[in-house]
Amino acid sequence: MSTFTRGFATSCLKTWPWLIVLILTAILLTQRTEFPQIVAYPEAWTLPIAEAVSAAMDGLVEWVQHTARAISGGLNVAFSAVQWLLIGAPWLASVSLFALIAWQGGGWRLALLTFVLLLYVLTSGYWVPAMNTLSLVLVALPLSVLIGFGLGYLGYRSHRARQAIMPLLDLMQTVPAFAYLIPILLLFGFGPVVGLIASVVFAVPPMVRNTILGLQNIPPAVLESARMSGCSRRQQFSWVEFPAALPQMLVGVNQTTMAALSMVIIAAIIGGFNDIGWAVLSAMRKAQFGQSLLSGAVIVILAVLLDRISAAYAARQLPTSSFCGLPLRRFALVFVAILAVTMLAGYLFPVLHDWPAWLTYSPAQAINEATTQFVRAYGDLMAAVKNGMQFFLLLPVKLGVERAIVPFTWGITFTPAAKVAYWVIALAGCAVAFGLSWWRAGVAILVLAGVIYFGTTGLPWLTVLLLISLVAYQVSGPGLALFAGGSVAFLLITGLWEPAMISVYLCSVAVFLCIVFGGLIGIWAASSEAVSGIIRPINDMLQTLPQFVLLIPALMLFQVGDFTALLAIIAYAIVPMIRYTEQGLRMVPKTLIDVGRSCGCSAWQLFWQVRLPQALPQILVGINQTILYGLGMLVIAALVGTTGLGQAIFVALGEANAGAGLVAGLGMALIAMTTDRILQAVIPG
């Protein structure tokens, strides 16, 4: 018996579960025309889970509505007070105090940056919407920090509490925010407070995680020294635990600040409140590229300022140093003095109280005209790019080449002979891989060939259930297999199968392109300091931008549709792929590279045989994060006309249907959590 034959036989023995699933799939596909329910999950088999959740939500609303509305009223009072302070105060006072806070945290450069950026907000005419947004953040942030700290400390002190808290945090961070906006809306009523409460819910997890991490990282010797010194539990916390964990907790405050801002912007979709998120959304709906771009720039400014200032204070731990600023007591006196002087100046000189209209400048109309001219000049080219991607990439993945290759789009017919040749090539590739004992590659060839041929929306639902469960079992065992299979079953019995597969198709294409182009950019950046210096601020900008701001340029140039959503998802999800690829390649030990060179490796061999294998764990983490980012962006992409789970959530949001929204959101969360756990099991270490 030849080596090839022995390898083929051995591969068949190792892959018998896969072969059974693939043979079953082939049998099912031959009967799909006669029995459409093989591909489309029968509606009669679905369970009214969304209706049950809605009924439970109605009962909860009736039970706690008065308490919830009282809480809403209290938060509204706090919000109105902060709003009155920020908007009612002279602009000179607000700008001066923000700059002073920035100076105390990060020095004169940060103060100058704060002053200049706030002047842009004033001159752009978006001061009031920006201050309304900042008012929501300033009320939501202390609540998020306090609740997050309390839950984090509870999780640190109690293992049982931590076991309950951590899965809850996973749900809070994976369930799309729009899904839980609906029950918040029903409980607390319409208005800006809805965005405030949603921001608190969304922003708590980073604070909880960083609090637990900071307290767990305290050296045991430090705690033992405190006990030996006779400290009570309260003294140990106040004098030892809290100061030691403070740097990590301040990192949590920074992350919580950014999460609160991003959620406030998203909540504007249902708030109808005069904040900067509503300004962006209104301009997008009116197809006003200039206005949406300028208001989006204000969001970026707020994000940058909050990020830089909170990060500066986190780095310095507490504003008590006199190196860049003033001691705390003297700083408080200067703060009060500047507040009094600027308030007095604002009331004495109206030009220092309300920004003069004649100093407001908005190039929005010029941008709109330039955009119109650009579209007229290059519209045919952009349409060709959009149609090419739609016909030759998106539709084949969604519908399969079997249905996508038609004369209208491809200019050719997918004849029976071509179909036979397609499967002959696929089977030959699988056989060669089996003969070489590369059984995983052989199985992957067959599965990929099936997905490309039938499309993500043309696969039998039983096949998807079995394949995902089998993958989960082989990488981690029965526990993960049960979770993965249960997640797929949830999508089936809730009637979300079709929108879920549409979401998977769009996210898969986006992730594939992110891996290809993000990986190449990361490799390039790792080999060139100049390229790395250019790419780094671009990555920072893409991650600082609130998600739906990324829709603006794609929407204005390509209108609504899957291609526009694809571009926005790529722009948001490509960053971790670039960063982790570059980081992984740069972390390869220099000694290994020197050994490779001494062995006579060429640059090509050095990359493939030394650097890439060493960087692979980091790259796999980047792929994991890219998938999660892509799934997170899918809901935002529903704003530009995509179908799928994101659209289901938006429809439920418009109808205030808590059951449908929460079930669709949980479905998306289960997809994200299943993908994350499988990849974590695959990633070495």
Image: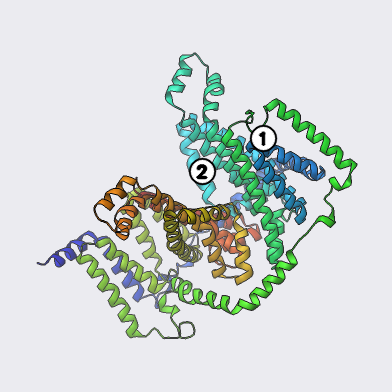
Q: Which residue is mark 1?
A: 104
Across and down, in percent, residue 475 comes to 32, 52
Q: Nearer the viewer, residue 340 or 175?
A: 340
Callout in the foreground (1, 2): 1
Task: Tell me if 480 is positioned left or right of 323 in this view.
Answer: left
Label 1 or label 2, whichever comes before in sequence order: 1
301 over 423 or under it: above or below: above
Q: State the residue position of label 2.
A: 168
Query: Which residue is most to the left?
Result: 1
Q: Where, quadrant-wise, is the C terminus in this rendering?
A: top left
Query: Does residue 582 appear left or right of residue 640 in this picture?
Result: left
Toward which corner of the image does residue 460 lie, by quadrant? bottom left
- In contact (CB < 8 Å): disc 1 and disc 2: no
Going by the picture, which residue comes out furthest to the right?
348
x, y percent for residue 396? 44, 74
Indicate the quadrant where residue 414 lies.
bottom left
Question: What amino acid type is highlighted by mark number 2?
Answer: Leu
> Where is 159 relative to 289, above or below?
above
**C-alpha distance separating marks 1 and 2:** 37 Å
